[in-house]
Image (cartoon, rainbow, N blue to C red):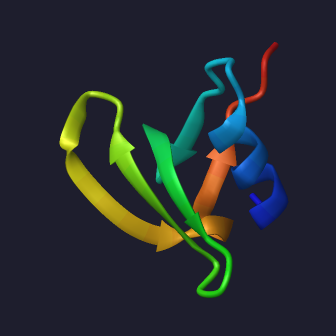
Amino acid sequence: MDLERAKEILQSPQKITVNYRGEPVWIEMVDETAEKVRVHAETNPDEIKIVPVYDLEEQQLH
């Protein structure tokens, strides 16, 4: 995923499924300078990670 799309998803009122290494996550913050995002697992909001934005994948609707 690129930075612009991550920012769009963060600001979207709709739920857009994003995966990090196959696990659904919520984007909490986008750090444009470091090109990283802070995410938490959908199933465990206390599990916060800072990961490269390019490692995120948007789940496509079929």
Question: Which of 33/52 is in front?
Answer: 33
Side (left or right) of 32 relative to 41: right
32 in relation to 59, above or below: below
Work out whether residue 20 can be spotted: yes
At which x and y percent is residue 45? Answer: 24, 37
57 in relation to 24, above or below: below
The number of discs equals 0
44 in relation to 37, above or below: above
Work out whether residue 2 can be spotted: no
Side (left or right) of 50 relative to 34: left
The residue at the far top in this view is 62
Residue in view at x 75 percent, y 58 percent: 1
Residue in view at x 70 percent, y 52 percent: 6
Residue in view at x 20 percent, y 34 percent: 44
At which x and y percent is residue 61? Answer: 78, 17
At which x and y percent is residue 31? Answer: 58, 73
The residue at the far bottom in this view is 33
Side (left or right) of 6 relative to 62: left
At which x and y percent is residue 22? Answer: 48, 43
Question: Which of 21/48 is in front?
Answer: 48
Residue in view at x 26 percent, y 28 percent: 43
